[in-house]
Image (spheres, grey):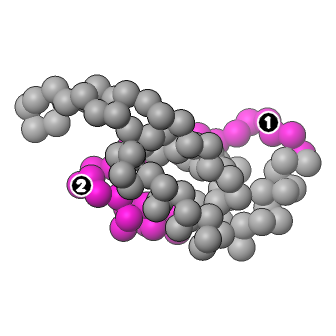
Amino acid sequence: MPTVYITAPLSAADEIVETVLEERLVACVNHLPIRSTYRWEGEIHREEEALLLAKTTDDAYDDLVSRVQELHPHDVPCIERFDEDDVLESFATWREDVIE
């Protein structure tokens, strides 16, 4: 089961989180403030953003990525998948139960 690493502008993060939770594409999202520094179109940018760690399932992953892309204001959003080698079984069961 994957955890999905997503960064988003602070102004868009709450909508993304609420939508993917309401649509049952994730079981939980950890939402942390971060400062991102990156190169875009030849310039270095510094932005206050949100880091979203979304807990999902293999079955819901593609729909989650598509939905985040629809909601995200950036042309190239940061969406990275981390697969778990080991997870507490009770947590894995809970996550499976709450995602459709």
- Categorize mark 1 by other alpha carbons within 10 Å: few (<14), some (14-19), many (20+): few
Residue 75, which numbered label? Answer: 2
Q: Is residue 38 above or below residue 1?
A: above
**What count of labels does the image hold?**
2
| Residue 55 picture location, percent across and down | 66, 50
Question: Callout 1: helix, strand or loop?
Answer: loop
**Residue 76 located left or right of residue 17:** left
Query: Residues in magenta?
Result: 62-89
Give the position of the C terminus as an image quadrant.
bottom right
Taking the view exactly as shown, the residue that stands out farthest to the right is 90
Number of the label disc, if any, that sits on residue 86: 1
Residue 92 location (% of width, % of height): 82, 50
Q: Residues within 10 Å of mark 2 (few under 14, many from 20)?
A: few
Q: Which mark is residue 51?
A: none
**Mark 2 or 1, closer to the camera:** 2
Which label's residue is closer to the chain start, 2 or 1? 2
Q: Nearer the viewer, residue 36 or 42?
A: 36
